[in-house]
Amino acid sequence: MILVLAAPSGAGKTTLAHALVEHRTDVEFSLSATTRPPRPGEQHDEDYHFVDDAGFDRLLADGELLEWAMVHGRRYGTMRAGVEAALAAGRHVVLDIDVQGAQRVRRSLPDAGLVFILPPSAAEMLRRLRTRGSEGPEELKTRMRTALAELDAVSGFDHVIINAEFGEALAEIESILDGSAPTQDDAEIAAVLERLRADIDDIIQRGI
Ligand code: 5GP
């Protein structure tokens, strides 16, 4: 199965994706290419396939990307070969990509499972972004604005997971892979979404 995890920044998506791959031998992580420079501690071909603009252009021209998107001014794309190799080896493959990318995967690979991960609250989302420490106040504000727009895409996803308790969120993702996902509590998701929108809006108005 191709499992796509998408979420606003600060929802804990990347940590969940990495934990999933560590936890299970039948799941592979899809390594993306990006023109974003590495953050401290990030390794080439481990966290991303880091390329310059010309390198990304080449990947595009050679048809090596399954999808790509511009996120916060940098290009990111899913490497077709990695996804195909994992599937050929009989493994699930997890894509940690942005919301636009997920929507594109839906169009080109209709059988992919699309999971939207929500942070439990706007305050927690901001706290996670600050802990990462790689964005200044203006960048944080941009990410909060982008998050508001991304929340509007939730209805196009197959599953929504509220990442309040890490172990529970991980177990939910595993149950989706295993085809035993519990029925979603739509009322709870609607309530979390409504509160998130109001609180993110408030944070943007008040300033970060
Ligand atoms: P970051 O720079 O924080 O690692 O990632 C920024 C955003 O780009 C995240 O939402 C991440 O999931 C997304 N992203 C990473 N790789 C890809 C990709 O291959 N395609 C798309 N569309 N988005 C990606």
Image (cartoon, rainbow, N blue to C red):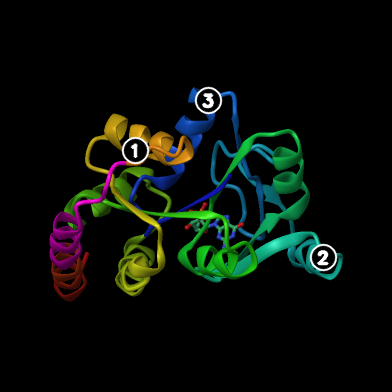
Residue 125 spot, x, y in % from top left: 26, 52
Check disc 3 and report its element: helix, strand or loop: loop
Q: Give the labeled residue for mark 2.
A: 63
Q: In the rendered structure, which disc, 3 or 1, sits on the residue that comes first in sequence? A: 3
Check disc 2 and report its element: helix, strand or loop: loop
Q: Is residue 95 left or right of residue 131?
A: right
Q: Which residues are magenta?
A: 182-195
Of residues 96 and 189, the one drawn nearer to the viewer in this rendering: 189
Q: Which mark is residue 131?
A: none
The part of the image, by quadrant, that contains residue 67 is: bottom right
Q: Give the labeled residue for mark 3.
A: 24
The kind of residue tagged 3 is Arg
Q: Is residue 52 left or right of residue 137?
A: right
Tell me if label 2 and label 1 are in contact, CB under 8 Å. no
Q: Give the labeled residue for mark 1.
A: 172
Instruction: Give the residue drawn at x 20%, y 63%.
Output: 193
The part of the image, by quadrant, that contains residue 179 is: top left
Check disc 1 and report its element: helix, strand or loop: helix
Q: Residues within 10 Å of mark 2 (few under 14, many from 20)?
A: few
Residue 1 spot, x, y in % from top left: 58, 44
Instruction: Give the residue drawn at x 34%, y 75%.
Output: 149
Q: Is residue 127 above or below residue 193?
A: above
Q: Nearer the viewer, mark 2 or mark 1?
A: 1
Residue 138 in view (yes/no):
no
Residue 38 in view (yes/no):
yes
Q: Verify whether residue 198 appears in magenta.
A: no
The kind of residue tagged 2 is Gly
Q: In the rendered structure, which disc, 2 or 3, sits on the residue that comes first in sequence? A: 3
Instruction: Give the residue drawn at x 86%, y 65%.
Output: 62
Q: Main secondary structure of the magenta part?
A: helix
Tell me if label 3 and label 1 are in contact, CB under 8 Å. no
